[in-house]
Amino acid sequence: MTAIPPQKKDLIILVPDQDIYSGIQELLTRPQALQVRQIAFDMFKHPYRDPGCFNEAHEFLRPYIGKYEFALVVFDKDGSGQEILGATGIETALTQKLAQNGWPNRAGVVVIDPELEIWVWSDSNQVDAALGWTGKTPALRDWLVSKGFSTTANAKPARPKEAYESALREARTPKSPAIFKKLAGNVSFSRCVDASFTRLKTLLQNWFPETI
């Protein structure tokens, strides 16, 4: 009797830390908001964080080539050791390496520029709530301006991680991966205009289109 080979899962994800892990885990509980079908996935954290994701993802993921349809690697540009390449250059270089090591046309890389905290700064009131700023005066955005945090063209703080940590300290809210989970579970994705978030959504939509 011929043995039936085990069915592949949809997706394996490699991330550098618990913050990104928590955020993406929560995002994938909202397939309808992402405009994808339900995804069967497993996610792992690389022990060497962002540099490990860039330098060793192809080796880390090699044992799983036959067990998953697609592979996704998500990490920060800042701290990766490859900042000079820029986010797009890092994504291209690692995608090519993954293709050469068993994942041709079925691996994607999302590099968050400069770091995960850029995803926090949508214009949703959920940001105020997650950071412990509800009801505080001045308003969070006004306070950031008063502290010298200039904004980019899409109204995000130019130094997103520093702004995030400063706001938490002012509100006396402890840092926690649960904040990223809360935001991922509550903020409308239409409010998330960051290029790396858009890339993540596009990859997932191409791989796992909504079923009719």
Image (spheres, rainbow, N blue to C red):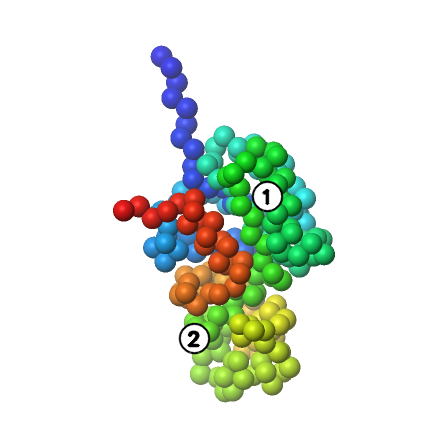
Name which residue type carries label 1: Thr
Relative to 79, say whether 208 is above or below.
above
Residue at 37% in and 47% down: 209
Question: Residue at label 1?
Answer: 95
Q: Quadrant of residue 1?
A: top left
Q: Is 48 located above or below residue 131 in the figure?
A: above
- Please provide percent x and percent y for residue 84: 72, 56
- In 3D space, how far apart are the residues under numbered discs 1 and 2 (Cα atoms)? 36 Å
Q: Earlier in the sequence, mark 1 or mark 2?
A: 1
**Label 1 vs label 2, nearer the camera:** 1
- Please determine whether, in this image, residue 96 is positioned above or below residue 87: above
Residue type indicated by callout 2: Asn
Q: Position of residue 188 (x, y in %)?
A: 40, 65
x 50%, y 55%: residue = 199
Residue bearing the label numbered 2: 125
Instruction: Quadrant for residue 191, please give it.
Output: bottom left
Q: Picture quarter containing residue 95?
A: top right
User: Can you say whether 90 is above or below 62 in the image?
Assistant: below
Who is closer to the viewer here, 41 or 105?
Answer: 105
Query: Crowding at label 1, few (<14), some or many (≥20) Cα neighbours within 10 Å?
Result: many
- Asked if one can make out residue 35 in the rendered structure from this viewpoint, the answer is yes
Please name the residue shown 65% across and 41% down the image: 56
Q: Position of residue 111 (x, y in %)?
A: 59, 54
